[in-house]
Image (cartoon, grey):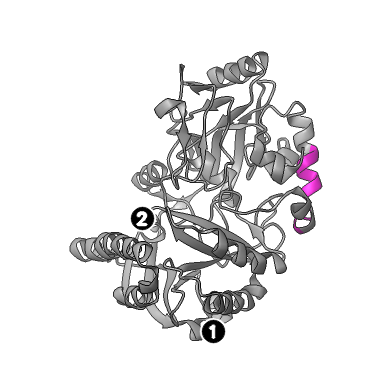
Amino acid sequence: MSTTVSGKNGTWRNWGGNVAARPAREVTPASVEELADAVRKAAEDGLKVKPVGTGHSFTSIAATDGVLIRPQLLSGIRDIDRDDMTVTVGAGTQLKRLNLALAREGLSLRNMGDIMEQTVSGAISTGTHGTGRESGSIAAQIKGLELVTADGTVLTCSEKENPEVFAAARIGLGALGIVTAITFAVEPVFLLTAREEPMPFDRVLADFDELWAENEHFEFYWFPHTGNTNTKRNNRSAGPEKPVPQLQGWIEDEFLSNGVFQVAQWVGRAAPGTIPTIARISSKALSARTYTDVPYKVFTSPRRVRFVEMEYAVPREAAVTVLRELRTMVDRSGMKVSFPVEVRTAPADDITLSTASGRDSAYIAVHMVKGTPYQAYFTAAERIFTAHEGRPHWGKVHTRDAEYFSGVYPRFGEFTALRDRLDPDRRFQNDYLRRVLGA
């Protein structure tokens, strides 16, 4: 186990650059036992403890002035059970490593988010999700968890073992314990056909229910200041495999989606008046395409342009109304928004603090390029989302607190009672958890 002090001048920063923290020390445990020792030692020293993955959260959910736990040595596949169709992995495993390892074994997760840089534990703890008519977030695919609790105990949970912990810890916000291993349901690797095409915003809104019902995975991006969207429909396919040709993939996914888009963001930052024109050009830059590939190559894409993001889950039936209100707000405000709005869906699940807990949900995400003032836009968007009982993504910018959450999560009290039992001394507390869960 190594113990060091963090980063430049001992400072840790997140991927979006909007959160910084100065931990007292950093620990990189090489085993679950070393992690349990680090938690007990922190208690002796009167320090709080927080694990941190790749820092892809835009909230201060992982920030601490106590002990920062780096889980990267607790990584790799521990076990593949082909009878139960599960895979158990260390908490520090990056999603991209998991996806590649599963593909080599002829296996796949059922659904995933649109990036795969995060650690599996960071992704599930914040409720990372993709889009799906019947298939939910990454956490909804969990069959078992191992976690180290505040007194250094190693606790395992599943639907049969410690089921009340399992119900909550799949999206545990780092408040119930430090996840050390996760068992996911997997299935034989399959093919997805992706159909990407531009579509007018008004048509997407008019046909939203139909587009959702007819496709296993439907999502779209709307470019503010324009009536344009890019839609993406992913459905299972019998094949054959027909990936995007390498050069075309580089032009569309790297050059246009990242390179040219980055330059457009720089121009927009320097001269905000040009943003509506840039948006019109950007929204037409990507042409329609269809391709068939293994799931992780279809679901995920590189994201090299740094940004800050707010995302809310609203009841699915409210999505079209919310989007219309968002468009009206942008048009009337005079704000210049250079980043597209992303819209996805998820079915209801049974995880205590999942943004889709107990209700079919639509996710609406607003972004601003890193370094641009985002507060006015996000505040106005948040006002719309909360008027529809929206639930913010735990790892993305929001201003909600425990009082608000107790109103939009019917089982909120269940989670806080479990936390009182597992972490009575608030070993895993930080300012963010104090705000969202209450003291």
* 414 in magenta: yes
Q: Which residue is mark 2?
A: 305
- Secondary structure under the numbered disc 2 in the rendered image: loop
367 left or right, relative to 348: left
The kind of residue on which mark 2 rests is Val
Q: Quote the CA–CA distance across marks 1 and 2.
A: 31 Å
Determine the residue positioned at 56% across, 63% down.
376
154 left or right, relative to 196: right
Determine the residue positioned at 42% across, 42% down.
98
Position above or below: 253 against 122: below
Is tag 1's residue or tag 2's residue first in the polypeptide sequence?
1
Q: Main secondary structure of the magenta part?
A: helix
Residue 260 in the image: state x and y as whole percent.
27, 64
Residue 270 in the image: state x and y as whole percent.
34, 62
- Which picture quadrant has residue 307? bottom left
Residue 369 in the image: state x and y as whole percent.
42, 58
Task: State which region is magenta.
Answer: 408-417
- Which picture quadrant has residue 271? bottom left
Q: Which residue is mark 1?
A: 207
299 left or right, relative to 433: left
